[in-house]
Structures are given as C-alpha cells and as structure tokens.
C-alpha cells in the first residue's frame, strides 16, 4: 500500500513540473500560434539561475552559520524571474518578425534559439551539473507507513497545484485574462476593438517563460541542473500538449497528469519502453483526436 | 498570381543547360581526390551523403509543402539496418546493405506515412517528431540489441564484391568509398530530378500550392503525399546506410529529433525552393559544422546564430540568394 502512495506522489511530482513547463508552452501557442522549440531551454535557464543563486549564498555564508531555509526558499524563484525577463526580451526582438511568415521559419528560428541558449548556459555555468541540494536536505523526509518520502517533494507538488489554480483564476477571472482569451480566439478582431496585441503577446510570452522558469527553479533542489535537460523537458512537454491539446491549459494539466502517471508506472514496471510508450500515446492521441483531448480544432 | 511566382523558382531549366553546369561539377567532384588530401575527400563524402538525405527531405518540404521534424528516424533506420546486418547476419557487401536499408525504410515509412500524411502544418511536424522519438528511445533503451549509447560498430564494407577496405581504412574511404558515394549520389540526384519533373512531382507541387484546387483537378492528395513521404524517407535512409561505413559507428544521436533539426537546417541553408538548394546546403552545413566543432566548444552557439540570421535575412537560402543576385546582375 505504501509503495502505491509513493508511486502516486512521484507521479504528481512529475506532473507538477511538467504542467509548469507544458502549460507555458501551450499558453504561448494558444495566444501566438508559435511552437517555441526553445521553451525547454528556458526551463533549463530557470533551473541554472536558481541553483547558481542558492549555491552562491551557501558558498558566501560562514561555515557555522549556514543561510536559513526560508531565505533560500525566497531566493529560489529567482530562476523563474530570470526566465521571464529573458522571455520579455526575446519576444519583441526575435519572434515578432516571424508571426506573418510561414511556420517553417518560426520553427527554425526557435530551433536556432534552442542551440544558442544551450551554449549560453554552457558558457555561463560550464559543463558541470549545478545543484541546490541544501534546500532539499534541509527539508528532511516524512514517513508514510513503512516508507519515507522527501518533504521537499510535497512543496513541488503544492507549487504545481497552486500554479494551476492561480493560472485558472488569472485567465478566467481577470480583465487581463479576458483580453488574452480574446486575442487567442481572434487576433484581428481584438486588435480592431482596441487591444494592444503586441503588448498581449509580450505578456503572454513572458508568462509562459515565467512558468517554465518556475518549473526549473522548483525542481533544482531535488535534481541537479545539467546540460541537455532543456531538450529532454521539451520533448516530454510536447507529449503533454499533444495529449491535452495545443493551446489548452486544462489539456496541459490533464496531459501532465497522464504523462506523470505513465512515466512513474513505466519506470517501475517497463523501464525499457517507458519513453516509447509515452511517444506512442502522443502519436495515438494525434491520430484519434488531432486537436488533443481538450483542444479546439 | 502568387501560386505562379512560387512555382517559378522550382521550374527546371532545359536539359541542355542543366548538363552545361552539371557535367563540369561532376568532373570537379571526380577529380577532387587527386587534388586535395584524404581528410578533405572524406569530409566531402560526408557532405554528399548528407546531400542525399536533404534531397529526400526536400521532396516533402520544398515540393509537397510538409515540414517533417522526424527525418532523423529514417536516416537512423538506414544506419541501424546496416549495423544490425553486420552484427547478426555477418553481411559485408555494401550493395546488400543498401538493399536492406531500402527495404527497412520502405517498411517503416509506409507505416509512419499512413499516420502522418493525414495531417499538415504543425501537426504533421509534431507527429513525425513523436514517431521518430519512439525509434530513438528504442535504440537508446534496447542496448542489448542496439548497443545503447555505445552504438554499434560497422567495419568497412566490400564494394561491388571486389574492393575491400582491408589494410588502410582511411585510404579506402578517401578513394574507393568516395567514388562509391559519388556514384550513389549521382544516381539519387538523377532519380530525384526525374521524380520532381514527372507528372507525379508536378502534382505534389500543385498540392503544395493549393490543396483544394489540386483535389478538384482529381489528384488524390493523401495517396500522393503518402508516396512522397515514402520516397523521401527512403532517400534519407539510403543516406544513413552510406553514412555508417564512413563514420564506422552508429549511435542513437542520429535518431534524435535534434538531428532532424539539422536536416531542416541544411535544407533551408541551401534553399528549399530550388532543386539543388538542399545539396548545396548539406555540403556547406557539413563544412560549417565540422570547422565550428573544431574551432570552438560553443559551436552550437555559432550555428544557432547562423540559423537565426539566415531565416531573418536570407529566407531563400544560398541558392535562392545567388539566383536573385545573378538575375539582378544580368538585368543590368
């Protein structure tokens, strides 16, 4: 029984992080109709910045007086903010010229961006993994029946759940959300009604990057930031958005849960074909419902 | 009018004028091993192999208007077919390798194609990518068959049942194997030329330019796209089979979707609106990557910047830009 609970918690853990990454990807696609291949790298960027900030603080502190857990927790979102700032810079400069052009070019420019950010990370932080494991260790672990489970993981799950709630409230209950949805449904019409589409685009892209960065920031205490983590995350979030429906946040949530459960089950029972099963699920959903489970055609 | 202007770039010149520049290029390619050193010859062989892959890829992108982000799968199927034929069947004949790769690629692309050609635009791209990642993860995880990340070693093959690579492997690759690659390259180019100039190729371009109109003319869109997908995958798989002996090793990297991205990159670099664009792009990209990797650890950054600048300022690629400059110069 305990083992089932542990598996369920792990599935939720994956789902939380995946929702943050894939939700951002989906949001950006929903509003701007751009598939950002560099999105995974913004997640990696967030992870690196958070690990770097935490590491810096730990290294600077006196050995007998380590920095408090609260302070470290407060600094952790630095990665999310950095990714958001990066996004706010990228959209108007690099992506804006491509909205009116063919999809091939949009994909290619984000592919180029992927390569660039990959190496910028390597240049800034070197080829070695960066960790913020202090935070993970400070939280200790919790007993669940016979088994023990790291307390920090509960925090990650909570952040994922909170992010989903906030995002829902933001999109369905605020004025900005209305404008965002209107732009997503019909860009020309909302522009005609006086919406500053350029500004909405920057905001949506920044929000998407913020989510990806937050995903990176909260995962980095339990897993180290490594080169190539962005590309891996991108592929998994592709599966999430394909299953849930490109451009739909509810879909991203459901997709993240499905992928989380399948991954956890896969690692436990069919490790060899875990990834293949995930891709096959994505391909099957595409074949049966090309717009995804929650997508609009 | 717009449909007319887009097809103009793919209009082919008269056969005589084509021979006028194709023959000198071929003579140069044949003479090159006598002029440059072995390293340069092998580098060019890599470029020609990638040229075949990009040529196949462009049948979908340039002629049918479908952007595949999963062509690494077919390249990998070709490469792994050869490696597995060596490992389990002990085959050494290059011709058998090519036949095996073609058969394997036909099987894989036929199945993948049925699924993929039902969609266009971004969904086509994502579906091809997802399916290619299935193969990648299998190659990656089933290490007792595929060697996992260690990959599979492939010794030098026997060419035409006569020439073997016993002894000096480098000399073999730089002479006999180079000419073999060149021969297959020429055959592939001619075959592709025939395909795109045939009524079938014209139908594909009609589908690309206006799907609805093409359907009303009586073209069975899905079947045509499926055949194009098949041919495209087989060309890329053939390139994979030719690539393995050159590299001596095949690893799951060549199945990963980032390698598909490289194939797209080289095609756009050369210019996907022209027949020769992908070939030129593949050869140039090969030099660019080889020297960038040798020059700096941040070669990805360099290539990324090249790609971004390229799509921003030279969307028609090297060949498209050259043609425009040539036309402007002649008009003066």
Image (cartoon, grey):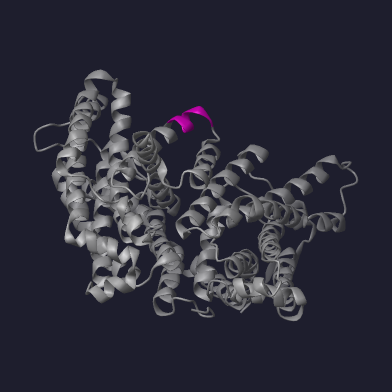
Where residue B214 appears, as percent x and y from the top left, is 28, 70
Q: Is residue A30 above or below residue B279?
A: below
In the displayed structure, does residue B173 sit left or right of residue B308? left
In the displayed structure, does residue A119 sit left or right of residue B9? right
Quarter of the figure that contains the N terminus of chain B = bottom left
Q: Residue at x 49, y 77 (%)?
A: A292
> How many marks overall?
0
In the displayed structure, does residue A208 sit left or right of residue B233? right
Where residue A54 appears, as percent x and y from the top left, is 78, 49
Foreground residue among A281 and B183: B183
- Residue B295: say if magenta: yes
In the displayed structure, does residue B49 sit left or right of residue A214? left
Q: Is residue A33 above or below residue B171?
A: below
Q: Main secondary structure of the magenta part?
A: helix
- For the question of whether residue B259 can be seen, the reply is yes
Foreground residue among B102 and A295: A295
- For the question of whether residue B153 can be seen, the reply is no
Q: Residue at x 77, y 52 (%)?
A: A134
Q: Residue at x 52, y 79 (%)?
A: A296
Residue A204, picture quadrant? bottom right
Where residue A129 appears, as percent x and y from the top left, is 64, 45
Where residue A235 appears, as percent x and y from the top left, is 51, 60
Residue A87, picture quadrant? bottom right
- Residue B170: say if magenta: no
Q: Is residue B106 above or below residue B43?
A: below
Q: Which residues are magenta?
A: B291-296
Residue A43, picture quadrant? bottom right
Quarter of the figure that contains the C terminus of chain B = top left
């Amino acid at each position: 029984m305990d083992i089932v609970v542990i598996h369920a918690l792990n599935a939720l853990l994956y789902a939380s992080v995946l929702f943050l990454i894939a939700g951002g990807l989906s949001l950006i696609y929903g509003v701007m109709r751009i598939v950002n291949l560099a999105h995974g790298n913004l997640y990696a960027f967030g992870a690196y910045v958070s690990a770097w900030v935490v590491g810096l603080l730990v290294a600077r502190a006196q050995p007998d007086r380590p920095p408090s857990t609260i302070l470290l927790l407060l600094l952790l979102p630095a990665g999310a903010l950095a990714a958001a700032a990066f996004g706010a810079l990228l959209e108007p400069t690099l992506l804006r010229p491509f909205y009116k052009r063919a999809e091939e070019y949009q994909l290619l420019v984000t592919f180029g961006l992927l390569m660039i950010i990959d190496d910028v990370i390597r240049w800034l932080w070197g080829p070695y993994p960066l960790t913020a494991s202090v935070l993970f260790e400070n939280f200790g672990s919790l007993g669940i029946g016979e088994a023990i489970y790291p307390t920090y993981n509960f925090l990650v799950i909570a952040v994922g759940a909170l992010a989903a709630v906030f995002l829902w409230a933001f999109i369905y209950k605020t004025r900005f959300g209305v404008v965002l949805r209107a732009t997503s449904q019909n860009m020309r019409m909302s522009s005609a009604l006086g919406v500053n589409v350029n500004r909405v685009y920057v905001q949506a892209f920044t929000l998407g990057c913020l989510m990806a960065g937050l995903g990176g920031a909260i995962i980095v205490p339990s897993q180290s930031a490594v080169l190539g983590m962005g590309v891996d995350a991108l592929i998994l979030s592709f599966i999430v958005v394909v299953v849930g429906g490109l451009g739909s946040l509810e879909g991203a949530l459901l997709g993240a849960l499905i992928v989380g459960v399948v991954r956890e089950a896969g690692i436990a029972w069919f490790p060899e074909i875990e990834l293949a099963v995930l891709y096959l699920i994505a391909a099957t959903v595409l074949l049966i419902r090309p717009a995804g489970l929650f997508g609009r055609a | 009018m717009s449909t007319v202007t887009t097809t103009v770039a793919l209009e082919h010149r008269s056969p005589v004028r084509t021979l006028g520049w194709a023959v000198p290029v071929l003579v140069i390619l044949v003479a090159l091993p006598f002029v440059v050193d072995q390293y340069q010859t092998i580098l060019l062989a890599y470029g020609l192999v990638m040229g075949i892959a990009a040529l196949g890829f462009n049948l979908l992108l340039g002629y049918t208007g479908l952007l595949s982000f999963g062509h690494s799968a077919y390249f990998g199927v070709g490469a792994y077919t050869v490696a597995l034929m060596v490992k389990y069947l002990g085959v050494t004949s290059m011709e058998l390798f090519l036949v095996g790769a073609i058969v394997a690629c036909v099987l894989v692309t036929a199945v993948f194609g049925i699924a993929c050609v039902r969609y266009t635009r971004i969904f086509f791209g994502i579906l091809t990518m997802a399916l290619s990642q299935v193969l990648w993860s299998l190659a990656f995880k089933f290490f007792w068959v595929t060697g996992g990340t260690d990959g599979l070693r492939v010794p030098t093959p026997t060419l035409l049942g006569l020439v073997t690579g016993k002894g000096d492997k480098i000399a073999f690759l730089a002479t006999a194997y180079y000419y073999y690659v060149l021969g297959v390259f020429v055959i592939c180019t001619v075959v592709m030329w025939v395909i795109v100039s045939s009524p079938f190729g014209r139908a594909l371009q009609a589908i690309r330019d206006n799907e609805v109109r093409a359907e009303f003319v009586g073209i069975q869109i899905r079947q045509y796209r499926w055949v194009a997908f098949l041919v495209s995958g087989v060309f890329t798989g053939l390139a994979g089979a030719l690539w393995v002996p050159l590299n001596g090793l095949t690893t799951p990297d060549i199945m990963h979707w980032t390698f598909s991205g490289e194939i797209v990159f080289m095609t756009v670099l050369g210019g996907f609106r022209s027949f020769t664009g992908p070939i030129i792009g593949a050869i140039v990209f090969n030099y660019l990557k080889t020297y960038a990797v040798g020059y700096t650890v941040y070669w990805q950054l360099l290539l990324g910047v090249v790609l971004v600048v390229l799509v921003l300022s030279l969307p028609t690629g090297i060949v498209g830009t050259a043609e425009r400059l040539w036309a402007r110069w002649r008009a003066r």
